[in-house]
Amino acid sequence: MTEKLSLEKRFLSIEENYKEIKENIAAAAERSGRNESDIRFMAVTKTVEPIFINHALSLGIDLIGENKVQELLSKTEFLEGEAEKHIIGHLQSNKARKIINEVSMIESVDSVSLAAEISRQAVNNSKTMDILLEVNIGAEASKTGFDFSAVNESAFKIAEMKNICIRGLMAVPPICEEKAELRAYFSKMRRLFEDMKSSSPAFSQFDTLSLGMSGDYAEAIEEGSTLIRVGSALFGMRRY
Ligand SMILES: *Cc1c(COP(=O)(O)O)cnc(C)c1O
């Protein structure tokens, strides 16, 4: 009885959270003169059990993100409906083979060698994999991702690889005390994205700038993000 009640409570809280997030997205789009429909919403489902993910999908959410290959694979068979899936966490090259047919995008490509392995697996499976290049925008030792100054050169190498399409950039900025500092990171990413896109036909297919999580998606939208990745604001605090 209590079990059922807490399940329903949690379903309800996901519904309420999603409603509030959608209102916040609309307000941020309005403030920045953007079209709400240009911002894609991703539910980040790490540590979330399939029953709750399915409830989120039943609300119309159509994109989920997982950090770990094993966790993604263990949940896939329990998911109901046709959600698109992205990998958003550091991917070891030797795991690329396992997810090549499971996800539509790898957002966390952080080295030329990883891209080369994804390319090899994509060729083997006769498909093209969409990727984003992850930028270590705060130059943090604890994070993976390309150095800001190295993205462009690496991107040219990756753009030449077979069966890979670079759709844009992704970043997780450092924790910032000041919103102004956070916005500066986002806007630096936006400028890099625009500069690369306009600099070469190799990047003309850029359409995705993945910025913003539970605590900062409104600022990210105002600074130009096209894809926000939201976990705890939707599902509640993660319990590991
Ligand atoms: C966990 C995670 C998120 C979501 O984080 P929340 O703060 O819970 O919204 C987004 N992006 C990446 C890369 C993550 O690892």
Image (cartoon, rainbow, N blue to C red):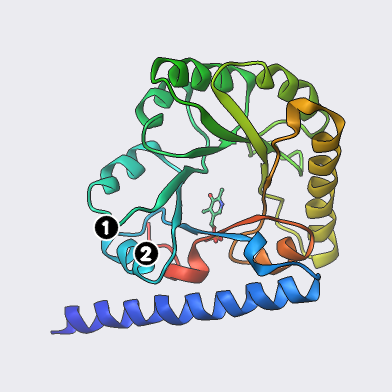
- The percent coordinates of residue 211 (x first, y second) are 67, 53
The quadrant in which the N terminus is found is bottom left
Q: Where in the figure is residue 228, as x and y percent of width and height?
A: 61, 58
**Where is residue 113 shown, x and y percent of the image?**
59, 17
Q: Is residue 221 above or below residue 23?
A: above
Q: What residue is pinned by disc 1?
A: 80
Q: Nearer the viewer, residue 11 or 39?
A: 39
Q: Mark 2 points at which residue?
A: 57
Is ligand 1 within 8 Å of the beta carbon of the residue shown at mark 2?
no
> Which residue lies at the image location 44% right of the left edge and 19% below the top edge?
121
Q: Is residue 50 above or below residue 124?
A: below
User: Which label was assigned to residue 202?
Assistant: none
Q: In this view, does 91 lie to the left or right of 56?
A: right
Splitting the image into 4 quarters, where does residue 72 fall? Answer: top left
Snapshot quadrant of residue 80: bottom left
Q: Residues within 10 Å of mark 1 (few under 14, many from 20)?
A: some
Residue 101 or 154: which is nearer the viewer? Answer: 101
Distance from disc 1 to disc 2, alpha carbons, whole Å, reads 8 Å
Using residue 176 as the reference point, say whether residue 124 is left or right of it: left
Q: Quadrant of the C terminus?
A: bottom left
- At horizontal 43% and vertical 46% (from top left) the residue drawn is 85
Residue type marked 2: Leu
Contact (Cβ within 8 Å) of mark 1 with mark 2: yes
Give the residue at x 52% y 19%.
119
Q: What residue is shown at x 71% (from left), y 50% (from top)?
A: 173
Please determine whether, in this image, residue 158 is positioned above or below residue 130. above
